[in-house]
Amino acid sequence: MKANYSLSHSLIAIDTETTLDLILNFNAEEQVQASNRRSLNLSLVIDRSGSMAGQPLRYAIEAAQKLVESLNPDDIVSVVIYDDSAETILPPQKAADKAKISAQINRIRAGGCTNLSGGWLMGCECVKSQKTEERLNRVLLLTDGKANMGVTNPQALTKTAKQQAERGIITTTLGFGTNFNEDLLIDIADAAGGNFYFIQSPDDAVDVFRIELESLTSVVAENLTVTIRPEASVQISEVLNKYQSTTQGKASEILLGDVYQIEAKQLALQLLIPPQKNPGPLTIATIEYQYQTTIDDNIQQVSGQVPITITVGSAEEASRTKADMSVLEQTSQLRIARLKNEAIAMADRGQYKEAAEVLRSQVDELKSKLLNEIFEVAEEIAQLEYYAQRIENRKLDSASRKEMRDQSYQTLNRSRDDLKLRGSTAGNADSLEAVSTTEGGVLVKCFREGGKLRVRVISEGYNSEFNVQFPRGIRQEGVSYVVDEMKLSANGSFYRATGKIRRLVEPGQEKAVTPEKAKSQKLAAVKATGGWEDLETVDTVGDGVVIQCIKEKSKLRARVVSDGYNPDFNIRFPRNIRAEGVLYVVDEVRESADGKSYISYGKVRRLLQ
């Protein structure tokens, strides 16, 4: 493995206290062929609770099947499903008969509540039964809801994740939709030494599974640990990434975890250097690192050392030395990621104005450094302005909060471009003036690409491959816009939309005003004629609530299995359509007057799987 570093400044002024940024990169030294990679011992743990019914579960099944297709015949795979209880539907076995494994996964059906701990720990046991030092031992835990059965205490779950990691079983968590607890899944992933992903929509599942499998199958080093030993006069003022660390005196030991062939493992620090009296080269720190890797089919410990040096020169020389913009860009994005977490915490406490100000102050700082001439930073600015507005207006909904946490997590822990700034919560273009002609303007369109909303130029004479810097708040997938002018960035790598922005509509709709959402009708309690076979069928849940019928002794009991409801409450639901195991979707569920049961309202439909 290769280790190298970059400093934000290559020369500092004599007799001057200096703060600078240091980035360490650890890269694979050579390409590892897929056929020679370490075998996997993998357990897929899939949430099949009622809220996963329909489209979400179908896409999760498809993603799991594609992952199995990509395994080597000698890889070990098991599949655990869970709702109220957990079940191993595929005991640990070699991935030789992929058709058989895929068929088993295809039989998964939804129903019940979310016993996350039960499913996860059963997956850990599957991995434990086949665990060897030569294999990569991993659990992939997918959920779309909050743990509401089994062990539900976040601290207990996080502690268990750390204990499993100490036994060599790493867990990656995948949150699906908008109902899961992102703070819990991130804490589990951090404690377990794995990764976290926000699967923003059902069709995003396959892509996210692909990214995780690419990571797993390209591990070139495990347990990378870095010790930073600053020289006597130098201080580590900040560690910008979010890794587990310990301090001994002035030295810091940081656990970076796995290193993947396909992406560099990065560590960023801020150093404080006191005034130096002598010009010339100066060693400011020594970096020691160690990791485990496979050499000649054996796991071996490897270590290395890198001295960090800088040049001390005159004040004039320092003023002529330009900062490394690439380093400033990367460390700025890391600081932004930390600020997003800070803003979320403030918003959670009700400090909306202060949280918005934290984000906006960072926008001003980025612009003052001219970093907005780099597209990734310009895009970050658009994100910050968007989230600041939502927080200030108290509209930081569940999806937006998850996006912010996901963006922060990926920036602080990963260096893959396809994981940066993922976010596709719908903006709203309805407030824009509507026109039916592009005359006098430039036509652009908003697309969803790999979990991101991107804008490209459609008009001739422009590079359609270039991204367009565009306000995040009005981005809406599939919508076309007419912009007064398109300006090329200073570095010639992207466009900026300037002037007035209008929405392009069909002729005759130019003056159309977006109708207000119809006020919700006063819903009546659910009624139905005939039997369950006579109900209208649907294959998606949408904004509805999922109800399941279960057999309890001689009675058929209806209960709510969508997240956010108490599964122990009885619910008023027509007896004539109850059938064991059937899932239903109703428009609304409300608590009864005494707060001890539920009543179903609106239309009832049968959910197909």
Image (cartoon, grey):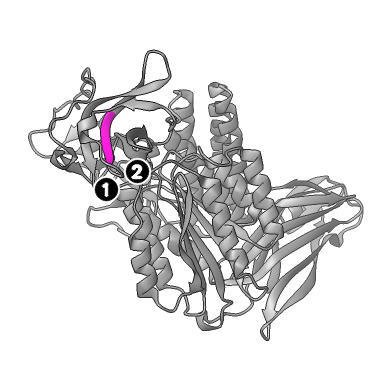
Rendered residue at 89%/56% (across/down): 231
Question: What's the amino acid at mark 1?
Answer: Val
Q: Is residue 371 visible?
A: no
Question: What's the amino acid at mark 2?
Answer: Ala
421 and 486: which is toward the camera: 421
Q: Residue furthest top?
A: 593
Image location of residue 153, percent across then percent down: 61, 37
Residue 585 on the magenta span: yes
Task: Check disc 1 and report its element: helix, strand or loop.
Answer: strand
442 and 521: which is toward the camera: 521
Q: Residue furthest left?
A: 508
Rendered residue at 48%/36% (across/down): 401
293 and 571: which is toward the camera: 571
Q: Which region shows up in magenta?
A: 583-587
Q: Where is mark 2, residue-wise?
A: 497
Dot label at residue 444: 1
Residue 75, above or below 598: below
Rendered residue at 76%/74% (across/down): 302
**What is the total number of numbered labels drawn onto the structure image?**
2
Rendered residue at 46%/74% (across/down): 71
**Quadrant location of residue 433?**
top left
Image location of residue 333, percent across then percent down: 58, 47
